């Protein structure tokens, strides 16, 4: 079975349980860990890593300091990763690009358009409704990263590292609904990439 480490960047566990269940429901064995306990060695002992959302603001220096250990593990590890919302922003900042306040709070299903074919979107429509819940956005793609999707509210809805299986998604794929189920498909595709 595929073993996935789910990193909880929230102050408590209950906010990350839906993400853990989504990964598990797509056939992976999940090990939860708090952001305070991560390291490159820990990341590399799993088939893949999923980085959760967080209420922290990545644009703030205190947040950058708080999560510097996790950013070091993102940079140094060789394991595939999926960064979700804050996890996406954390990945972007680790690779040298800014995260900025957007001037609004987005909390809604938004139209998201796939711009380039990729295994992460295998079998999914070119346009999907996916939930965004955020105050900040990644300002620009990190060097070498490719833009895979954009939404009505985020110019960088999905990005991918040029040589490693590192994905950042600004949306919350685990917060899918019966009417808009495609977030679950994104997680499923990521888990299949780990086999």
Image (tube, grey):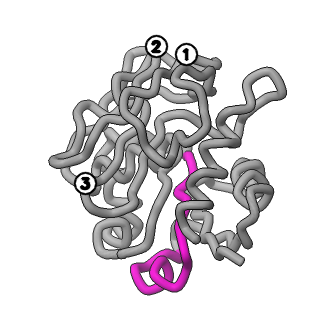
Circles 1, 2 touching at the beta carbon (< 8 Å): yes
**Chain part drawn in magenta:** 37-53
Q: State the residue position of label 2.
A: 152
Q: Quadrant of residue 131?
A: top right
Contact check, label 1 and label 3, Cβ < 8 Å? no
- Residue 51 in sight: yes
Residue 48 belongs to magenta span: yes
Dot placed on the residue nearer the N-terminal end, 3 or 2:
2
Is 141 part of what is drawn in magenta?
no
Which quarter shows the N terminus? bottom right
Residue 59 percent across, percent down from the top left: 32, 39
Residue that carries the numbered disc 1 in the rendered image: 111
How far separated are the C-alphas under marks 3 and 2? 25 Å
Q: Secondary structure at mark 1?
A: strand
How far is the residue under mark 1 from the one under mark 2? Answer: 6 Å
> Is the residue marked by circle 1 packed among few (<14), some (14-19), or many (20+) residues within 10 Å?
some
Q: Is residue 146 above or below residue 34?
A: above
Task: Bin the neighbour count of mark 3 within 10 Å (Cα to Cα): few under 14, some 14-19, many 20 and up.
Answer: few
Q: Report the front residue among 60 and 33.
A: 33
Say which label, 1 or 3, has the lower sequence index.
Answer: 1
Closest to the camera, between mark 3 and mark 2, is: 3
As drawn, 88 above or below 170: below
Residue at left offset 16%, top offset 47%:
143
Mark 2 falls on what kind of element?
loop
Residue occupying image coordinates x 62% and y 70%: 4
Instruction: Give me the residue at 53% from left, 76% from top.
Output: 37
- Residue topped by disc 3: 162
Q: Is residue 13 visible?
A: no
Along the viewing direction, whichever of 175 and 136 lies nearer the viewer: 175
């Amino acid at each position: 079975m595929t073993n996935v480490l789910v990193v909880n960047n929230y102050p408590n566990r209950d906010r990350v349980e839906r993400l853990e269940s989504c990964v598990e429901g797509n056939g992976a064995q999940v090990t939860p860990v708090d952001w305070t306990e991560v390291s490159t060695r820990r990341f590399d002992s799993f088939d893949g890593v999923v980085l959760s959302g967080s209420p922290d603001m990545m644009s703030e220096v205190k947040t950058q300091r708080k999560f510097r250990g996790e950013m070091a593990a993102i940079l140094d590890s060789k394991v595939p990763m999926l960064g979700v919302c804050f996890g996406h922003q954390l990945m972007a900042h680790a690779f040298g690009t800014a995260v900025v306040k957007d001037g609004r709070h987005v909390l809604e299903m938004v139209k998201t358009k796939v711009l380039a074919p990729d295994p992460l979107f295998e079998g999914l429509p070119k346009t999907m409704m996916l939930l965004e819940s955020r105050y900040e956005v990644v300002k620009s793609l990190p060097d070498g990263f490719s833009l895979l999707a954009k939404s009505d509210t985020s110019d960088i809805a999905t990005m991918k590292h040029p040589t490693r299986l590192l994905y950042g998604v600004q949306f919350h794929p685990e917060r899918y609904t019966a009417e808009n189920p495609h977030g679950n498909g994104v997680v499923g595709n990521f888990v299949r990439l780990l086999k």
